[in-house]
Image (cartoon, rainbow, N blue to C red):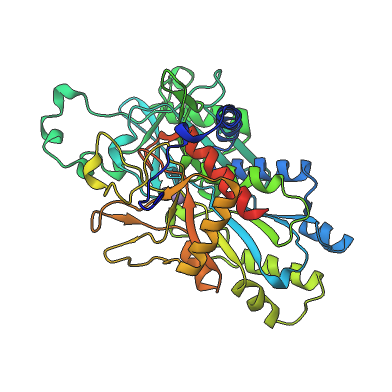
Amino acid sequence: MENLEYKRKNVWQEVDPEEYQAIFAYGEAYKHFLDRAKTEREATKYIVKAAEEAGFLPLDQALAKGLAPGQKIYLNNRGKSAVLMVLGQDILEGMHIVGAHIDSPRLDLKQNPLYESENLALFKTHYYGGIRKYQWPTLPLALYGRIFTQEGQAVDIAIGDDPQDPVFYVTDLLVHLSKDQEKKTLGEGIEGEQLNIVVGHDSYHFKDEKESPIKKSILKILHDKYGILEEDFLVAELEAVPAGQARDVGFDRAMIMGHGHDDRVCAFGALDAILGIENPQKTAVALFTDKEETGSYGNTGMEGAFFKYFLEEVLYGLGHKEAIHLGRVLSKTQVLSADVTAVVDPNHPEVMEKQNGAQGGHGVALAKYTGSRGKSGTNDANAEFLQEVRACFKGAGVIWQTGEMGKVDQGGGGTIAFILANQGCEVVDVGTPVFSMHAPLELISKADAYMTRKAYWAFLK
Ligand code: MN
Ligand code: MN
């Protein structure tokens, strides 16, 4: 009997010539996004612009116009998260949601960051999300974020990614003097308070100043360029991320190295899919959330109420004005939690269980559960929903595989899946396998990214 045994498929060995070309074309589109979406604010700008160009209306304009099936609506939530929706025939039948996050691990500036020490000016940082601290020194860094002048004028900072820009840098110990550091564990070798970023060195213009001439010089430059004072940092939101563009990897250019594949590879898949949705039977939604890497808290994270409020507005606009309607919709809604997963790495195969862990180039990965230590803290998808997802993927020719966050008791991880499941939706994690997840520069397969987008498209349409 054929197919008696399950055999995982390799995308590269399954696709036809047309789809083989499409994999590389999609890789180009994704890199374009990645280079313009280095932070959640930059990603939101990109997503909102793309939505507007595709005919999506902001929620208030859509409500004023009157809601109807086929209508495209978006929410820009504080410039840091977004919702895109295409209305189906009857929203009370539930929705199809693909939910990704657009924040990534990085170094945030402290609120009073600038100081001078040992002939350098530096910014103090507090890392954001789960990083391996030893990976961040000696990389070119770019700076992004928003700072307000004394007059209340918002100034958007983006410096380090234009080839003409300077970059920023965290120093590390020279090997010649690292005898003591070498004895420490990887986790202890570089400490959080050592991740200070070099931002200046020149004291020429303040040669008569005894106290902190370099710091004063930097403040002068910042004032001349942005009109800001040192006090303005106290109310700013500034993030340091690796500088530079996403790059193809390998002689065959089959992979992409870049910052923040977690989770922008899934976010772009969700965006590209929903931009092509016209008049769906079921209401299609793409979620782009912030703060996933710090637990999804706050009013831009998935635990925040913004999506619930958005839905309540849409329901009201459609004439479903009873409070009970929200629960009716959510309990009939199906969600792909669009987040990346671990992959079997030839340099570190020992942390993965190969029969269930995702393998590079074998398509988008479906993880029934995440969590750690006995599935703690996870959504655990229902078999009935998994069967529906399998049938959907099969019908669309999506090549997929199972994924899990490593061997039992090796570690683990979480996504936004449990949050929507707690609200009554059917949810399963479906996303791209990533090498070196949470490293400053991560690695993915173009074949897997392509199949991720194809899976979201199949689910939303
Ligand atoms: Mn993630
Ligand atoms: Mn992550």
**Left or right: 251 with respect to 229?**
left
| Image position, residue 330 (x, y; %) | 62, 72
Residue pushed farthest front? 1
Residue pushed farthest right? 65
| Image position, residue 121 (x, y; %) | 40, 30
> Is 12 above or below relative to 124?
above
> Is 95 above or below relative to 358?
below
| Image position, residue 362 (x, y; %) | 42, 40
Look at the image and tell me whether residue 43 can be seen: yes
> Is 96 above or below relative to 214?
below
> Is 307 above or below relative to 17?
below
Which quarter of the picture shows residue 168? top left
At 34% across and 24% down in the image, what residue appears?
A: 119
| Image position, residue 456 (x, y; %) | 59, 50
At 70% across and 81% down in the image, what residue appears?
A: 323
| In-front residue for pair 441/379 | 379
| In-front residue for pair 60/125 | 60
Q: How many marks?
A: 0
At 54% across and 21% down in the image, what residue appears?
A: 165
| In-front residue for pair 260/171 | 260
| In-front residue for pair 411/296 | 411
**Left or right: 190 with respect to 439?**
left
Look at the image and tell me whether residue 232 can be seen: no
Which quarter of the picture shows residue 179? top left
**Left or right: 350 with respect to 230?**
left
